[in-house]
Image: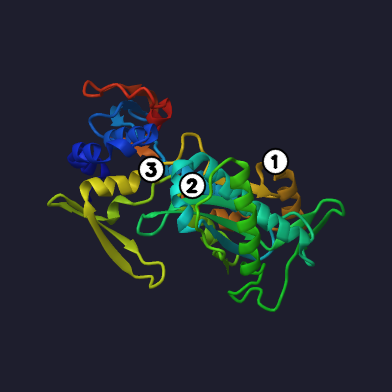
Amino acid sequence: MIRLSTIIEIFESEFLAQYQDRLLPSHRHALAALKRCRTALSPRMQAQCVECDQQRFVPHSCGHRLCPHCQHHESQQWLERQLGKQVPGAYCLLTFTLPAEFRGLAFAHQRTLYALLMQCSWETLRTFSLNDKQLQGTPGAVAVLHTHSRRLDYHPHVHLVMPAAAIDAKRRLWRTKTGKNQGKGGAYLFSHKALAKVFRAKLLAALVQAGLTLPRCHPQKWVIDCKHVGSGEKALVYLGRYLYRGVLQEKDILACEKGQVTFRYRNGKTRKPEIRTLSGADFLWLLLRHVLPKGFRRARNFGFLHPNSKRLIRLLHLLFKLNPSPALAIVRKRPPLRCPSCGGEMRIVRTRILSLLSPPYPPDASTEALVM
C-alpha cells in the first residue's frame, strides 16, 4: 500500500513551488501533519502491558481530519451517537448541491459559505415540514458537508438524513408522513423541484446579506436529490465514512511513479470503478483543497435530532418501544493495543514524547494534531 506521507515526501518541493500563491495556513498545517503521521518524525506514545509490564513506544497519529487512517475511533463514536437517535418513520437522504458557478466564491469564503449552505438547507426542509399537511411540525435532520465529488474535484454539497416525521410542540404530537410510495424505495417526502426553488432563494438572499458578490451568471434551476433510505442506517454509515478520515483511502492509491499518482474511485452513475492519474503536485492540491477551516463543524444535527433533545428521543423510544441496540451492533469497537510478548492489553502511560528527528510544528499548528 502506498502511504500518503510517502507521496508528500516525494512531491512536496514541487507542490510548494507550483502552488505557493494558493496555499492557506490550513493547507500548510495539513501538509505538515500528514507528512509526519505515524512516521519517524512523529512524536511517540509510551504503552505498558497490564500483565507483564512490557513497554513499547508507538508513533502518534496526526489526528488531522484529512488523514485517511486517523480518527477511526471518532468516526465510530459519531456513528454510534446518530444510530442511537433513530426514530420511527421512513428515512430520506437529501442532497443540496451548490451550482458550479458558485464554487470560486465558496473557496474564497469557505467558512461563511459552508455555514450558509448548511443552514439554508436545513431552513428549507424546516419550512416545508411546517407547511406540510401531514407533518405540520419541526423535523429533525443530520447534516454533513462534503466538498468533493467521487473524482475528488471541488464540489461543495450537503447531505441531510431526515426521517419523514415531525414534532408539533404546541399540541405535543408526533406525526409521520405516509403515502402510497412509502417503504417501496421511492418514499415521497417533498417535491425536489419546489425544494430547489426555495433553497435557491434562501441561499441567494443569505449571500447578499453576508456581503458577498454573486456571480454574474448563475442558473435559474438548481438541483436537489431526494431518495428513500429505509431506516437510515446505511446512509449514516456512508456519511460517517468520510466525516473524519479524509477524502481518499490509501488502499485506493494504485501507483506513484514517473512523477505521477494514480488513484481509484467509483463512478456515481455506472457504479463501476475508474482510475484517474495526475502529476504528484496536482494530486496533493486535489486533496488539500478539501481541508476545512479550523474548527469548522462539518456535521450538524438540527431540529429534534439536536443534542439538546436527548430527553425527547428517549421518550419516543419508550412510547414506540424502539430499541436502537440492533442498529448499534454494526459499530465496531476500537481494538485494544496488544502486548507483543504475552498478548495482554497495553495502556498508554505517557504521550507526546518528541523524537530526536521531530522538528517543531509550524506556529499555526494546534496541539490537536498530536493527540491520539
Q: Amino acid at mark 2?
A: Gln
Which numbered tag is attached to residue 189? none
Relative to residue 178, is residue 208 depicted above or below? above
Q: Nearer the viewer, residue 198 or 152?
A: 198
**Residue of label 3:** 66
Q: Nearer the viewer, residue 89 or 17?
A: 17
The residue that appears at 38% across and 28% down in the rendered structure is 370
User: Colour scheme used in the picture?
Assistant: rainbow
Q: Nearer the viewer, residue 139 or 286?
A: 286
Residue 79 lies, in percent from the top left, at 53, 49
Relative to residue 184, is residue 6 depicted above or below? above
Q: Secondary structure at mark 1?
A: helix
Characterize the local packing of mark 2: few (<14), some (14-19) or many (20 or more) Cα atoms within 10 angstroms: many
The residue that appears at 22% across and 37% down in the rendered structure is 17
Residue 155 lies, in percent from the top left, at 43, 55
**Residue of label 2:** 76
The image quarter in which residue 349 lies: top left
Q: CA distance from mark 1 to mark 3?
A: 29 Å
User: Are the two marked residues, 1 and 2, in contact with CB atoms closer than 8 angstroms?
Assistant: no
Q: Is residue 170 left or right of residue 71?
A: right
The residue that appears at 38% across and 27% down in the rendered structure is 365
**Residue of label 1:** 308
Where's the C terminus, which quadrant?
Answer: top left
